[in-house]
Amino acid sequence: MRQIRVVLFVLACVFCKSILSRSSLAQDATVNVDWKAELAKAKTGIAKDPNSAFWHNQAGVAYDALGDFERAVKEIKLASKLDPSNANNYYALYALYKRKGMHLKQRQVLLDALEKDPNNPVGRFEFAYILEEEKHWADSLREYQVAKQLTAGVKGPKYIDSRGNVYEVEGIREEVDNAIHRVTTLSKSNAQK
């Protein structure tokens, strides 16, 4: 049960950060995590089961929190190889690459995640944002509209994928109309030039 709570916490941190970077939502609470202790737990888990994608993912998250980008990427890539059907690992890599501004890598792992779960509204929203940054207005608009449609189909504030991974969608609900309007405006102004 604790493992599930850790995974949920990590996913919430990863996706809330990406959504909050573009929105004005207030942070409700602060959670203090002893990342050295979390890393020690992950290493213990890996020692017991070296093929555990979960523990390699957790080690990657802890390394990231401790500022060791290279080890974080290495562990999460290994988690992706050990459990390639779990989109969560790809989203974790996406968040790492996004924070480092590694556009091509972030784009590719996001596409890998969407290949595993094309109905994830958070992934669609993030992909729309990438397309917007690339100035692919029509494609970005389409992806934002898909994200809006997928989010409308989610009951409550969380999307749960087929693996049980949980993704917060309230930020998308609050931002998607603004994003659609922004891309529509940019597309029209670009067409007039």
Image (cartoon, rainbow, N blue to C red):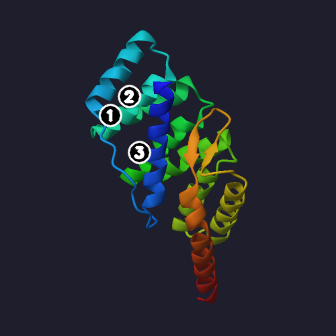
- Image side of residue 153 versus residue 114, left or right: right
Instruction: Identify the residue at image location x=70%, y=59%.
Output: 146
Q: Which mark is residue 63?
A: 1
The answer to whether residue 91 is above or below residue 40 is below
Q: Amino acid at mark 2?
A: Ala
Quarter of image, res 36: top left
Q: CA distance from mark 1 to mark 3?
A: 11 Å
Instruction: Identify the residue at image location x=69%, y=51%.
Output: 154
Q: Amino acid at mark 1?
A: Tyr
Q: Which mark is residue 120?
A: none
Q: Which callout, 2 or 3, points at the residue further toward the start of the chain?
A: 2
Q: Which callout, 1 or 3, points at the residue further toward the start of the chain?
A: 1
Asked if the residue under mark 2 is in contact with the one under mark 1, i.e. CB atoms within 8 Å, the reply is: yes
Where residue 122 appears, as percent x and y from the top left, is: 59, 52
- Circle 3 residue: 96
- Image side of residue 128 versus residue 50, left or right: right
Q: CA distance from mark 2 to mark 3?
A: 13 Å
Taking the view exactly as shown, the residue that stands out farthest to the top is 48
Instruction: Identify the residue at image location x=38%, y=28%.
Output: 59
- Circle 2 residue: 59
Mark 1 residue element = helix
